[in-house]
């Protein structure tokens, strides 16, 4: 049985490795296309018949791939591929049948494909997630979040506890850490990398330029076209907006909906 596979991946080396493993060891899976952004994936689903399986990276250049499936209901089982383990529970909530950590190993991929083939032979409903893997994630072998960041202060190095952080800002390739007391420090990490290291119950990605702590959201204003304007404390140096597409998820996070 020949199955059609779509790959959602924005890193060429990762795509080439996955495609090579599938071609060599799983020729019954035909890669029909590869897309590399949320926008391109939504357009692809709107223009093409559903594949039989999706191999989906999580961190894309324009956001997390979960945003795709908020706009287009998952049309088939998804095998998530990522360098981070912090998204495991969310992945299984999003039609995921497996979760592979990069670099993808041949044996792990074979296990995922075996699970997929068992699903295809028996039912069109995704199976329950691997309970043992979820238990391992919850009990300490899964998501762990940073409790401090090391910053430079002149010639000194200073640890900043995560509980002291109000928000992170990115502008012109520079990332800033802003503390609740109003201090600002430069970081070497991009926001995408930082986001994966933070507890999503406490911090939320408001837009491409800002990750904010819930306790530092002062006021949220309804804006035109469904957008939201967010006032932070201490005040951010520039206006912080949440797009119409991200407004619902932001309000649910702010309201404690999980």
Image (cartoon, rainbow, N blue to C red):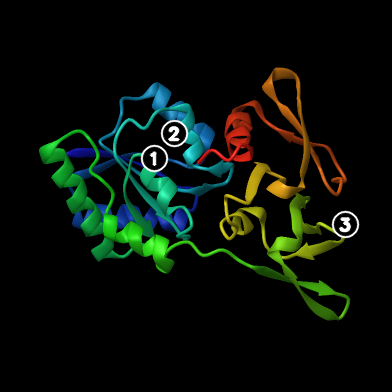
**SS of the residue under disc 3:** loop
Q: Position of residue 139 (x, y in %)?
A: 40, 65
Q: Residue furthest top?
A: 225
Q: Nearer the viewer, mark 1 or mark 3?
A: 3
Of labels 2 and 3, earlier in sequence is 2
Task: Give the residue at mark 1.
Answer: 94
Vertically, is 160 above or below 245?
A: below
Vertically, is 46 above or below 175?
A: above
**SS of the residue under disc 2:** helix
Q: Residues within 10 Å of mark 1 (few under 14, many from 20)?
A: some
Q: Position of residue 3 (x, y in %)?
A: 20, 39
Task: Give the residue at mark 2.
Answer: 69
Q: Residue at x 78, y 50 (%)?
A: 172
Q: Residue furthest bottom?
A: 155
Nearest the camera: 187 or 130? 130
Quarter of the rendering containing residue 150: bottom right
Q: Nearer the viewer, mark 2 or mark 1?
A: 1
Kindly identify which numbered label has been placed on residue 148.
Answer: none
Of labels 2 and 1, earlier in sequence is 2
User: Looking at the figure, which quarter contains the N terminus?
Assistant: top left
Q: CA distance from mark 2 to mark 3?
A: 37 Å
- Would you say 180 lies left or right of 91 here? right
Q: CA distance from mark 2 to mark 1?
A: 7 Å
Task: Give the residue at mark 3.
Answer: 182
- Report if residue 1 is visible in the image: no
- Would you say 176 lies left or right of 78 here? right
Q: Nearer the viewer, mark 2 or mark 3?
A: 3
Quarter of the rendering containing residue 197: bottom right
Q: Residue at x 76, y 62 (%)?
A: 164
Circles 2 and 1: CB atoms closer than 8 Å: yes
Q: Residue at x 83, y 37 (%)?
A: 239
């Amino acid at each position: 049985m020949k199955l059609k596979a779509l790959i959602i991946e924005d890193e060429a080396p990762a795509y080439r490795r996955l495609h090579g493993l599938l071609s060599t060891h799983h020729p019954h899976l035909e890669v029909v296309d590869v897309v590399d952004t949320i926008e391109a994936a939504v357009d692809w689903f709107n223009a093409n018949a559903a594949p039989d399986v999706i191999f989906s990276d999580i961190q894309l250049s324009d956001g997390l791939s979960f945003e795709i499936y908020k706009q287009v209901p998952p049309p088939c089982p998804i095998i998530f591929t990522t360098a981070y383990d912090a998204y495991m529970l969310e992945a299984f909530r999003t039609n995921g049948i497996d979760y592979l950590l990069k670099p993808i190993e041949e044996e792990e991929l074979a296990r995922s494909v075996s699970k997929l083939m068992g699903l295809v032979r028996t039912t069109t409903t995704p199976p329950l997630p691997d309970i043992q893997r979820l238990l391992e994630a919850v009990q300490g072998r899964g998501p762990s979040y940073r409790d401090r960041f090391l910053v430079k202060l002149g010639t000194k190095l200073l640890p900043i506890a995560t509980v002291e952080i109000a928000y992170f800002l990115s502008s012109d390739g520079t990332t800033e850490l802003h503390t609740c007391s109003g201090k600002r420090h430069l970081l070497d990490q991009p926001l995408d990398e930082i986001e994966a290291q933070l507890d999503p119950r406490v911090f939320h990605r408001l837009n491409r330029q800002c990750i904010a702590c819930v306790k530092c959201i002062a006021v949220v204003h309804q804006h035109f076209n469904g957008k939201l304007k967010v006032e932070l404390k201490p005040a951010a140096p520039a206006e912080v907006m949440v797009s119409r597409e991200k407004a619902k998820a932001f309000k649910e996070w702010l309201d404690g909906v999980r």
